[in-house]
Amino acid sequence: MSTATDATEAALTVQHRLPGFVPRMGIILGSGLGPLADKIEDAHAIAYDDLPGFPSIGVSGHAGKLILGLLGGVPVACLAGRAHAYEGRIDAMKVPVRTVKLIGAEAIYLTCAAGSMRETVGPGSLMTITDHLNLMGGNPLAGPNDPDFGPRFPPMEGAYDPELVAAQRQAAASLGISLADGVYAAWLGPAFETPAEVRMIKALGADAVGMSTVPECIVARHCGLRVTATAVITNLGVGLSDGPVNHDQTLAAAAEASERLQGLVTEVVRAFG
Ligand code: HPA
């Protein structure tokens, strides 16, 4: 089935299960950030398996449920579990993002783990993403365009909504959390970067590198969703510190920062609602 048909069917399934529910914001939870889903009140979960075109989720730290409910009193549609481009499809999250749009959300909040290019922004830091570099070598919109969702050549200027970046800064200040900002580079993976690649990514102007977020941002902007994103820094980029980088470290650092991220996301959603 086409992604348009899948997204329409998935939206109908959601509306059938929860008549009248209209989220203000979608949220995508990154590696190890699952606990945010437990903060959603009056939660109604739908397994990705029950939604056409939604990916099956493999990597540990991800679940695979669309959770509808209230966060900070505001209706949200939380995608708990993401598929990554390195699993084989750069457009794996296209249907979930478009479904969030079709059920009425105005914006989507992307969260992810990332490696830092800056020694001063170390593991456990939160970084609001202000722009990105797509280094994945592909684009989720390649192929026939579906004009029902958006234009053939969507602009990407201001992709990370400046008002929502400001909302993140304000929320962080009111919670007493420090929040870095920077450019996120998307790396296909699944192999981590070499030290030479990290030096290249840094030289290109990135502040952080990760294996997600950018395809979702592109799909979301194409269909007119406003986008905001926060990365949890789980490690310094390969070669910038002594130790090796591995997925367990990503999950552990994300878990440690999870409380602060939950607070930040909740406050931004509350302010947006
Ligand atoms: N590189 C790529 N992806 C990541 C990293 C990294 O250093 N840390 C967490 N996700």
Image: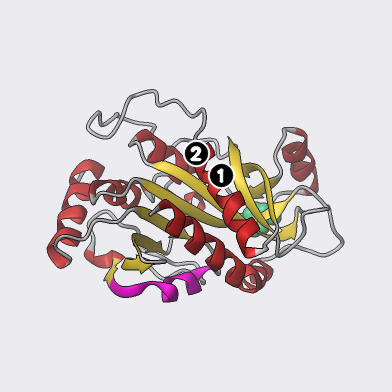
35 inside magenta stretch: yes
Quadrant of the image containing the C terminus = bottom left
Nearer the observer, 100 or 9: 100
Point out residue 25 in the picture as x, y percentages from the top left corner.
37, 53
Q: Which residue is drawn at 73% across and 60% down?
A: 235
Residue at the right extreme, as displayed: 242
Asked if disc 2 and disc 1 are in contact, CB closer than 8 Å, the reply is: yes
| Residue 238 in picture, x, y percent from top left | 77, 54
Residue under label 1, please give it: 165
**Among all residues in the image, which is located at the extreme top?**
153
Q: Is residue 210 visible?
A: no
Quadrant observed for ligand 1 in the rendered image: bottom right
Tell me, what colour scheme is on the image? secondary structure
Rendered image quadrant of residue 246: bottom right
Residue ID for mark 2: 161
Q: What element carries label 2?
A: loop
Q: What residue type is labelled 1?
A: Val
Q: Residue 133's x, y, as percent?
A: 60, 36
Kindly identify the residue that appears in the image at 60 percent across and 54 percent down.
231
The region drawn magenta spans: 33-44
Camera-side residue of 74 and 18: 74
Looking at mark 1, is its residue's CB closer than 8 Å to ligand 1?
no
What is the x, y in percent for residue 268?
Answer: 49, 56
Which residue is rendered at x = 48% and y = 63% of the image?
A: 266
Label 1 environment density (alpha carbons within 10 Å; few <14, some 14–19, many ≥20): many
Against 256, is 187 above or below? above
